[in-house]
Image (cartoon, rainbow, N blue to C red):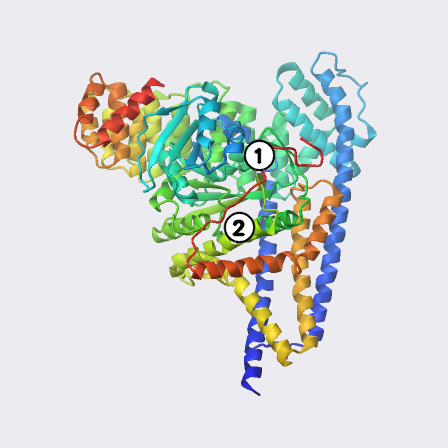
Amino acid sequence: MSIAEKLAIVLTSGIFLYSVALVIFYIFIGINSIAAVRKYLHKNDFTDYRLLASSAYAPSVSILAPAYNEGPNIVDNVRSLLSLYYNKLEVVVINDGSKDDSLQRLIAAYGLEKVDFFVNSRIPTKKVRGVYKTKHPAYNKLVVVDKENGGKADALNVGINVSGNDYIICIDADCILEQDAILKMVKPFLEEKDGKKVIASGGVIRIANSCVVKDGRLARVYLPENYWARMQALEYIRAFLLGRMAWAQLNGLLLISGAFGAFDKEIAIRCGGYNTHTVGEDMELVARMRRYMHEQNEPYVVTYIPDPLCWTEAPENTSILGRQRNRWIRGTIETLRFHRKMFMNPRYDLLGVLSYPYWLFFEMLAPVIEFTGMIAFLVMAWVGLINWHLFFAFLLFIIFFGYLNSIFAIYIEVATYNQYHRRKEIWKLVLAALSEPFVFHPFVVWSAIRGYYDYFMKKRAWGEMTRRGFGTAQGKGGA
Amino acid sequence: MTSPGNIHPELLYIYTAIFIVVILVILLRTGILLRKRRKKYQIEQQVQSVFDEWLSHLLTEDFPHDDTFVTPPWLAPGRENKIARQYAINQLISTKKNLAGHAGRNIIWLYEKMGLKADSIAKFRSPLWYHKAAGIYELYMMEQRDMQAAIARHTNHHNAYVRMESQTAVLAFAGFDGLIFLDTLTRPMNDWQQLKLIDQLTPLDPGNLEHLSIWLNAGNPDVVLFALKLAGLYQQMHVLEDVITLLKDHREKLREQAIKTLVRVGDENTPSVLIQRYAEETPGNRNTILKSLASMATDKELPFLQTLLEDGDPGVQLQAARIMMKCCHNGEALVKVSSLEPGDTYDQLYLHIKSEMAR
């Protein structure tokens, strides 16, 4: 047997074992997510969340909304946040040195005045230029902070320093929250069990493209018309309803989306707040908070709720989507590198021996392995080392397992929240799933490979995220 | 080592065929589910249209409380009408939440007349926890007091959700007298449950909570925590000593609640009691003490507050300055003098509080 043949066997064996492990993990995740979602639905079947809105015993919450050049939509987005149903609420909007007229628009719309405000900088940040409040009683929950540009993580850290409440909910300023979003996000913090402190809670993000948005609120849900957005709708269902619910059930969740996550402020501060040296600040904060709790020997949990509470606009073209995925993989690499101490370290329990290795092998390294496999395939095909019979059998095995995973996610969606009411939309989603291995998935892998390249080239850019905005009627039904 | 060479392609084809079969089954189930949902929606619309008419009468006096009322066949007891009957129960509960008096009694009458109570009891008797909890919820929302004794047996149930609904139910039936379950509660009662129970009790007269002292000395820390909240909420001065004792409890959460309760049940000595505890407390509870002092400090506390003003923690300094300026006679002048000292901090603190007071 030649060296080339031996190499080919090692390579293909490795990829094969990797694929089998991935399949086993996905089955494990699927089973766990069913248990988690079922339990959640049963226990909240007749919960009256309204109690929380006005109770003196409800925790106080600050929403932190960093904004950079959000001028056209900022006033409506803030109005939408101010209309959220919760008494002990403060809305902190952080203008991260926008170059447009975001601040002026807010000042004009809400009658803001610059106030003397002592910022207790428990987390070091870029300079705060001013804090604005209004005397208008309808907007007394609003605090606007103007600061020098320092990126999203720095803006959120300023928000943490300025906020006056016990819990923080970090969101993207352009997200649309459901009216009861705060109530549902806060409840897990009141449900501590077995003396385990709830340090963070994540919520599901859904894709709002093609939905009808009226007065800053989601009026009607539609499946995105655009192919790339539709694929992301499917991907988000799979990731949030299956993946994260399952990990939360195991108390091994390592990522809460930066677009919508709630945190115990004191723990976040004790951990040093958001890391400004990574583009994956959302994942990094969760990893650090968890690591901190382990190292302090304080029992804790990170929870997740499957209700669709936050809607965001997904990229609709390959250039923006590519930049987003490029950034995500860089964020993952950076976070896992910062916390490499946890890898297979039993001191961190499940986090060290299961969550971290999963993220390392099946999230961070997956694009590299897939890309390597593709190159190896081309080379082996060129030199005639491919066993075509086995190749096609394996290809079909993997593709159909991928289909099974997606179809199962769609089924769970229909059986639980069923956001897409029209049957046609469900079948469209199924069709989209069928195209995934040939169009969407290769693109995502390629973007991640570019992310690796940028990471090694030490490119730190966040990547511009141009959005169409929700301002006009986007849905078929019109606004 | 397992390698693709050891795997027969036929085996992979078999697995693939299994995947395809499972996919087809899931797709079929998805289709059936969508059909069921559509049917359910139609049934619910049908129930809703009848309910809209009934409810408009229920709100007035002219609803016939006699044998002329006939349950439509599609709402009659039976498995085939399960969806319609559950929807009817949900609608009645939802309406009842917003109604009281005569209209509320009409809702209950309708619930009983349609035999929906039997559905709730069947759920209550189910071995599945979520059915049991739902059954209890429906029964207490519909004020089925004859079920009180049966439900009360579950207030210490091993399932948290059954326990939670049972406890809420006994309070809904018996008001403050229902709190007797605290005497024997050995299982946890989380903050959400406590909030729910307090909400249930809020409109009622507490009387003299005679067992409060027993609960404050209970072995179950959640009972103690809840009792502290009750003591504070209803200003039960007679348990002041118990509350002060709890300031030294080894559990941080209990001490925190004891501090908050003390503000409500305390006397003129309370600020000095809290100040004595300050040095021994955790940073979180120190903050709670400072927040508590903000509503009760006097000139007597000035020396303590002045020492805090020189604390290295700006958060503590801010709170101390705030209390001085709001509660002490010459507090503002003292903070203003500090603000003239070198460095920006005191000046910023002073301006911050001035701005706060002006708003």
**Where in the figure is residue A352, as x and y percent of width and height?**
43, 59
Q: Secondary structure at mark 1?
A: loop
Can residue A236 be seen? yes
Q: Amino acid at mark 2?
A: Gln
From this view, report whether residue A442 is shown above or below residue A62. Answer: below
**Where in the figure is residue A367, as x and y percent of width and height?**
54, 62
Can residue B266 be seen? no
Label 2 environment density (alpha carbons within 10 Å; few <14, some 14–19, many ≥20): many
Label 1 environment density (alpha carbons within 10 Å; few <14, some 14–19, many ≥20): some
Q: Nearer the viewer, residue B146 or B204?
A: B204
Mark linked to residue A249: 2
Q: Is residue A262 left or right of residue A219?
A: left
Depth check, mark 1 against mark 2: the one in front is 1
Name the chain letter of the residue that bears numbered label 2. A
Identify the residue under disc 1.
A178
Mark linked to residue A339: none
Q: Nearer the viewer, residue B124 or A99?
A: A99
Residue lying at the far bottom in this picture: please name it: A1
Locate residue A50: give its quadrant: top right
Q: Secondary structure at mark 2?
A: helix
Residue lying at the far top in this picture: please name it: B61
